[in-house]
Amino acid sequence: MLNVVQRMVFVEIPPDHPRYLSLKIREKLVEGFLEGYVVPQGLIAHGRGEAFDYLIGEETIEPARRAMYAAVAALLLARHPVISVNGNVAALAIDDVIELAREVNAKIEVNLFYRTPERVRKIAEKFRERGVEVLGTDDDELCTIPELHSERRKVSCRGIYIADVVLVAIEDGDRTEALRKLGKLVIAIDLNPLSRTARAASITIVDNVVRAFKEMVKIARELKQRPRQELENILHTYDNYRTLRDVLLYICDRLRRLAEDRGLVIEPR
Ligand code: PTJ
């Protein structure tokens, strides 16, 4: 590990750099990696996410917002809502995860694909520093999801195991399918509309976690004021096929517009 760290190059990113925000987000993940709670595979996953973020224009698009309303309604209506956190999510959105969990009264659970006691402890510590206790640690009572063979099968008996609604983000495909088979409503935040997670989830939010959690906090504050009947209506009229279709059509239209309107050329500033 020391060799890897010694070989890494760090430079100060000037705030006027056109890709400043995106580069700062990368640095958060690299910091998490150096602290030992983000896995190298998480850095690769982020690269894939960045590519899809480019395609949607690095903003929250309408189908994603529609999915967020359904997701927040589901979380508010749930009996046992749980937000699942991995290394990347902890590095990129920890404060907004905490805020959303507060607004919708959800538990937060650490659940890792590359689970090691050390990584679990480090992520739990990040939350503890902010005054929040999380489920899924090695001190917690862990139950097993029989349909899963990866380390993700170990879940908290008080959390994901009994949850009716689970929010996952930056996730590999298997678990969403397994959780759905157990009858849970799964909300996924995933920038790739074609991933197995995106296609297997009950509600798919195709957006960057950096924007999505923040936006969902605002939506939760808005929806909490509405009658239960209205939340049920938002949830029951929601169609995830339509969302995924609209995301793909949005990307197609956007690329066509860029190609046809000379939007591919960057003029000097
Ligand atoms: O911390 P661990 O051990 O649980 O491991 C986490 C990783 C990310 C390594 C693990 O879940 C994994 O391998 O995920 P995948 O299979 O690479 O899938 C990640 C998905 O998240 C891909 O579809 C990416 O496009 C998407 N993604 C990446 N970054 C973001 C994202 N979606 C939303 N916001 C992002 N910032």
Image (cartoon, rainbow, N blue to C red):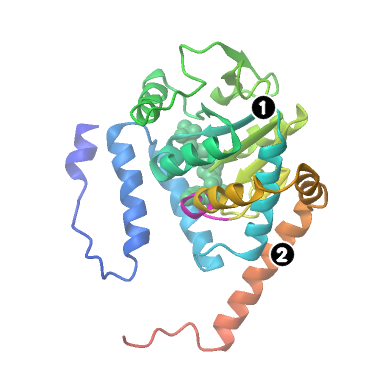
| Mark sitting earlier along the chain (2/1) | 1
Crowd around label 2: few <14 · some 14–19 · many ≥20 (10 Å): some
Helix, strand or loop: magenta stretch: helix
Tell me residue 121's x, y (percent).
38, 21
As drawn, the label of residue 254 is: none
Residue highlighted by disc 1? 80
Secondary structure beneath dot 1 equals loop
Instruction: Give yes or no for residue 209 being in the magenta stretch.
Output: yes
Q: Is residue 235 left or right of residue 3?
A: right
Q: Is residue 80 left or right of residue 138?
A: right
Q: Is residue 141 left or right of residue 71?
A: left
Tell me residue 83's x, y (percent).
57, 34
Query: Along the line of sight, which residue is nearer the eye, 69 or 25?
Result: 69
The residue stretch that appears in magenta: 207-212
Q: Is residue 151 above or below residue 51?
A: above
Front disc: 2 or 1: 1
Q: CA distance from mark 2 to mark 1?
A: 30 Å
Tell me residue 247's x, y (percent).
67, 63
Quarter occupied by residue 17: bottom left
Name the residue: 55% across, 89% down.
261
Crowd around label 1: few <14 · some 14–19 · many ≥20 (10 Å): some
Secondary structure beneath dot 2 equals helix
Name the residue: 54% across, 54% down.
215
Three-letter code for the amino acid on which mark 2 is drawn:
Asp
As drawn, the label of residue 246 is: 2
Q: Is residue 158 above or below residue 258?
A: above
Query: Along the line of sight, which residue is nearer the eye, 209 or 73?
Result: 73
Name the residue: 60% across, 22% down.
159
Three-letter code for the amino acid on which mark 1 is drawn:
His
